[in-house]
Structures are given as structure tokens and as C-alpha cells.
Image (cartoon, grey):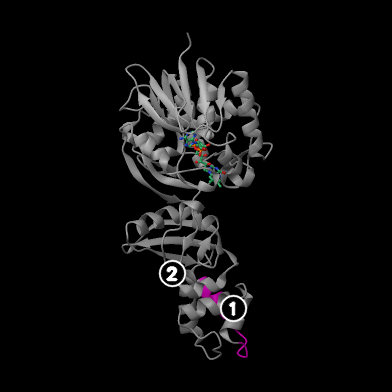
Amino acid sequence: MKKKVAVIGAGASGLMAASIASRSCDVTIFEKQKKIGRKLLATGNGRCNISNVNISPDRYHGGNKDFVAKVFERFGLLQTEDFFRDLGVPFIEEEEGKLFPASLQSSTIIKFFEYELIKNSVDIKLHRRIDKIIPLRSGFKVITAGMEEFVFDSVIIACGSCAYPQLGAAKNVYDLVASLGHSIVEPFPSITPINIKLKSLHKLQGIKWDCRLRVLYDNRAIAESYGEVLFTAYGISGPASLKISRWVNEISLKGEHSFIEFDFFPELSVEELQSLLAVVTADPQKSIGFSLLGILKERMPDTLLACGGFDPLNKNFEVTKDLQKIAQLLKGFIAPVGKCRGFDEAVVAAGGVAVDEVNPLTMESRIIKNLYLTGEILDIDGDSGGFNLQFAWSTGAIAGMSQ
Ligand SMILES: Cc1cc2nc3c(=O)[nH]c(=O)nc-3n(C[C@H](O)[C@H](O)[C@H](O)COP(=O)(O)OP(=O)(O)OC[C@H]3O[C@@H](n4cnc5c(N)ncnc54)[C@H](O)[C@@H]3O)c2cc1C
């Protein structure tokens, strides 16, 4: 008789685990929502940023990088590309090494997984939330919210995290695992917009500008990013801010304070920017604020100058001294970070199941035999750009291969 395997959660890692396990086992996949892969469908704005050519443990945070390294040694990008090519989904590469399915549609991935599951006779049970997993002397009893009971030889928990509840995520996934004896590192939102406490900066709402951002904490820079920043009514969003959000969120949830330093001209040195300022402010009839419209977008000169203590209407500035200070301001504009934004805006949750309790070569729990954990429920979070889905594919595949 074939081994009976339950997969809890039909998201990225659960679909991967079920596809592979069903090559040799009798698999049932439970999904609490009406459809499989709801979050997966929303990934990459519906295009599914499926992985990244720059996959490396350095792009992951939380638990421990050795764990991530071992996972990728067992099932890395190459194996993932092979898997999807066999499924009928070649990848294409875009900027920053981001990989997408050639169709540029996440719906393709879901349809092809569904095809694979049906082909391998997987029992797909939708609208079934698993509320309890009870270890038996041999195997597990799995109980749904509707009190249906099933018995399996092994269980793969692929329930995801509590990030983005609009797509069905919920905090109770951690209770399910904690009830089995696993420790949970308190989850917190990652890859989110950032609140900025400096209200006058909110006047830049709607403006997009390429910046270098540095997170300042405890008198040192602990993270940095480069890219587009979107100024909002509360602070900042856009790729560069999403990239550093993990660090500012972790600090603010500890009740401590960090600052963001904006470099509005990352391609220029202070001296080069000072020379450029001298060129655009050459006309003595123009105020400094009006002159700076030559190199900044509307509202930026007045807002940034005022925040730095300069009068934007001033026409009598000192070319050497004032322009040097303005260049320094535009290359090192410091603003305090406000409260962490919520899980409803978080692409992923940092924190989760402690990874020293899971074997990275099999994804089996070190606490309960034949119990496996995959994907975002683990205390590993990746950078934005395809890193989180890659971790879900790899851990799901390893759990599937280990059945
Ligand atoms: C808007 C958005 C865009 C994103 N875009 C990208 C991207 O382009 N690239 C990238 O790398 N990452 C992206 N991510 C992150 C990525 O989607 C996740 O890291 C990944 O889906 C995690 O996979 P998972 O299998 O762990 O969990 P999920 O994919 O979240 O799947 C978990 C599944 O389990 C189900 N479930 C939960 N509890 C139960 C239960 N008790 N019983 C039954 N079922 C249950 C859930 O309904 C869900 O379907 C994005 C996230 C969001 C929110």
C-alpha cells in the first residue's frame, strides 16, 4: 500500500510538495480557501516573480543562513528551473535577475500545478481548514474546522504565514504548529511601506525619486538600498523602501528608534553636487527654491530646504558655504522612522517556526517524526525579488521528495 500523505495548505510550497510526493504516495491536499494558490496568483502583480538568478543564503534573514544554504544545496535554483520546465513553464529573466514564467502570468503556474495534481490522483480538498493535528502512535489524525477526521502516515504543514490576511493568511497557523510542540519566533511584517515621523516630508506625497536609503540605528548604518522611492501621505513606499523595511520594522517593534538617511543624488559626490548647484543657482534673481527646480521635482526643493532649515525664498545665499550645506542635506537627509505598518501591507512575515527544530535536508520536524514544515511558516524571510517563492519551492520540493 502507498504511504498516505497530507499536505496542509495549497499555496506555493504545498503545491510543490504535493506534486512531488504524489509521484510515489497517496496524497491529500487540504486548502481552507475556495481555490488553490490564492496568494500565488497575486505574486509579482499577477506576473509571479518566481525566483531570482542571484539566489544565495545572503538574501535571507531570520533563523540561520546555514539552514538556507543546506536547503539550496539539496534543491536550488537549477532544480527549480528543471522542475518548472518539466511542468511546461520555462523562465524568463528581467531586471535585477528576477525570473518570471514565460507567460508572465501567475495563473499559468496554478493551472499547471492543478493539472499535475489531478494527473497524479491527488485528492484536493478545498474549503477545509485544518484546526488540529494529533500525532498517533503511528501517523496522525488530521481534523478540519468542520470536525471531519482523516488519518495519514505523514503530514506536511505548508500553511504560510500571517502576512496579507486579505488573501487568507491568519495568525492561527502558528497555533497549529505550536500545539505540536514547536517554538515560534514572534512574527513581524516585512517588505512593507515605512512610516516617517517627519510630517513635512509627507508633502512630497505622490513623488517618485531614485534614492540611496540607509537605515541608521545605534549610530551606525545597518542596512541600505538603492532604487525608486515613492513618497506617500505617511512616509515612503516603492522598491527601495520595501528592501529596508525588515530592519526598521524589527527595531520599532522592539520599542526602539531608527532613522532613514536619504541620498537624493547617489550618483554624485557632495563636491559634484555642489558644483551642479552652483550652475543651477547662477541667476541671482531666482530664489534658491525656484533654482533647485532645475534638478528636483516640484515640491521637493521647498520641502527639503525647509526641513533642512533653509529659506526656499532666499536669493542672497552664500555660494560656497550655503551650497555646500545644501549639497550635504540632499546627500544625507535624515528622517525618523515611525510605527511599523501592519501585516495587511506585508509581502511576507519575518519570524515563524524556529528552524533549529527542522532538518533542512528533509524538512522533517526534529520534534515529531513524519511531520514536515515548509515555506513561509518557517523563521526565514527573503528579500523581495523572487527570493521568498524560491524558498517555498525548495522547501516544498524537499518535503515532497522525503516522503
Ligand atoms: C501581494 C504579494 C505578492 C507577492 N509577490 C511575490 C513575488 O512576486 N515573488 C516572491 O518570491 N514572493 C512573493 N510574495 C511572497 C510569497 O507569495 C510567499 O512567500 C509564498 O507564497 C509562501 O509560500 P507558502 O507555501 O509558505 O504559503 P502560501 O503561498 O501563503 O500558502 C499557504 C496556504 O495555506 C492555506 N492555509 C493556511 N492555513 C491553513 C489551514 N489551517 N488549513 C488549510 N489550509 C490552510 C492558505 O489559505 C494558503 O493557500 C508575495 C506575497 C504577497 C502577499
- The residue sitting at the right extreme is 103
Q: Is residue 90 visible?
A: no
* Ligand 1 closer than 8 Å to label 1 CB: no
Badge 1 local density, few (<14 within 10 Å), some, or many (20+)?
many
Q: Which residue does the image show at 62% across and 47% down from the upper left?
A: 45
Judging depth in this view, the residue of 323 and 117 nearest the camera is 117
- Please give the count of numbered marks on the rendered protein: 2
Label 1 – label 2 distance at C-alpha: 25 Å
* Magenta region, residue range: 272-286
Type of amino acid under label 2: Lys
Is residue 375 toward the left or the right of residue 64 in the image? right
Type of amino acid under label 1: Leu
Q: Which residue does the image show at 55% across and 24% down from the upper left?
A: 19
Position in image of residue 176 (x %, y %)? 38, 35
* Mark 2 residue element: loop
Position in image of residue 189 (x %, y %)? 44, 51
Q: Quadrant of residue 82?
A: top right
Q: Does the magenta segment cover residue 379? A: no
| Residue 213 sits above or below residue 285 on the image | above
Look at mark 1 in the image and give the residue it sits on. 292
Is residue 217 toward the left or the right of residue 331 in the image? left
Q: Is residue 242 visible?
A: yes
Position in image of residue 207 (x %, y %)? 60, 67
* Mark 1 residue element: helix
Look at mark 2 in the image and give the residue it sits on. 197
- Mark with earlier residue (1, 2): 2
